Image (tube, rainbow, N blue to C red):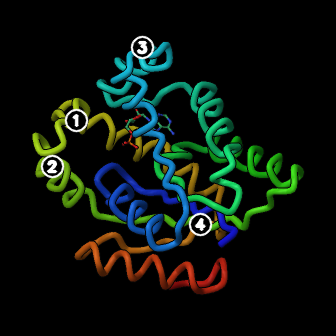
């Protein structure tokens, strides 16, 4: 594979679960910006100290900080043949920044086809899923208030991002059993870019 697979979708859409499965199936690294940040918080690094409160409140970490994280991570050797990106971009500015990173990697001889897959799940189901995982994963940002904020932030930011991607983003239903959703994603990826799955 020589693809940058970019998984979009609201909190609770199953991006993380599906990204792990895609990564295993394709032999590509799974890059989760949420995980990178949670590790930084746990290790109490300067980045973690800056990100902690923002994350716990369910807000977005600064675009400039995120770009630095992404540029560094995608430049690592294990990403040269492709990767699954989960949690980035979250808004249009990040989408534009990601294109810039991928263009720079392309000029450095690492050209990757971009596949943008957007998992769609109705809001009521998202809320039920996140409440269900509360306590199981022990995430601070699964609290009721942070959950509401994360869904609100997503609702405000994803429209402009998806509008900017236009036909480059392919919509895939995120409703159903994880196996079914995985099969839909695989079908979308095996069809030519821009085709409907
Ligand atoms: P996630 O695990 O993807 O839901 O991310 C958890 C939290 O990390 C988010 O609610 C944000 O606070 C932060 N975060 C993760 N990715 C990004 C991003 N691309 N831009 C800004 N903040 C992010």
Please determine whether, in this image, residue 157 is positioned above or below residue 78. Answer: above
* Residue drawn at x 60%, y 86% as measured from the top left: 191
| Mark sitting earlier along the chain (1/2) | 2
- The disc label shown at residue 49, or none: 3
* Element on which disc 4 rests: strand
Look at mark 2 in the image and give the residue it sits on: 133
In-image side of 32 versus 14 (left or right): right
Is label 1's Cβ within 8 Å of ligand 1? yes
- The disc label shown at residue 129, or none: none
Is disc 4 in contact with disc 2, using a CB cutoff of under 8 Å? no
Alpha carbon separation for disc pair 1 and 2: 9 Å
Q: Position of residue 97 (x, y in %)?
A: 70, 41
Please determine whether, in this image, residue 78 is positioned above or below residue 63. Answer: below
Q: Nearer the viewer, residue 124 or 182?
A: 182
Q: Position of residue 53 (x, y in %)?
A: 34, 17
Is disc 1 in contact with disc 2, using a CB cutoff of under 8 Å? yes
- The disc label shown at residue 169, or none: 4
| Mark sitting earlier along the chain (1/4) | 1
């Amino acid at each position: 594979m020589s693809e940058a697979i970019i998984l979009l979708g609201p909190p609770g859409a199953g991006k993380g679960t599906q990204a792990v499965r895609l990564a295993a199936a394709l032999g590509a690294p799974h890059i989760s910006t949420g995980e990178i940040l949670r590790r930084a918080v746990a290790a109490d690094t300067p980045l973690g100290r800056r990100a902690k409160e923002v994350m716990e409140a369910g807000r977005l970490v600064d675009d400039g900080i995120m770009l630095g994280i992404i540029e560094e991570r995608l430049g690592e050797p294990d990403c040269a043949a492709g990767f699954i990106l989960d949690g980035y971009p979250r808004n249009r500015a990040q989408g534009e920044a990601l294109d810039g990173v991928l263009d720079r990697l392309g000029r450095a001889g690492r050209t990757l086809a971009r596949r943008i897959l957007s998992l769609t799940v109705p809001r009521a189901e998202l809320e039920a899923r996140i409440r269900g995982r509360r306590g199981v994963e022990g995430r601070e940002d699964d609290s009721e208030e942070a959950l509401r904020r994360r869904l609100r932030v997503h609702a405000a930011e994803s429209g402009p991002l998806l509008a900017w991607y236009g036909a480059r983003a392919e919509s895939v239903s995120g409703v159903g059993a994880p196996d079914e959703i995985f099969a839909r994603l695989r079908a979308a990826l095996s069809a030519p870019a821009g085709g409907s799955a």
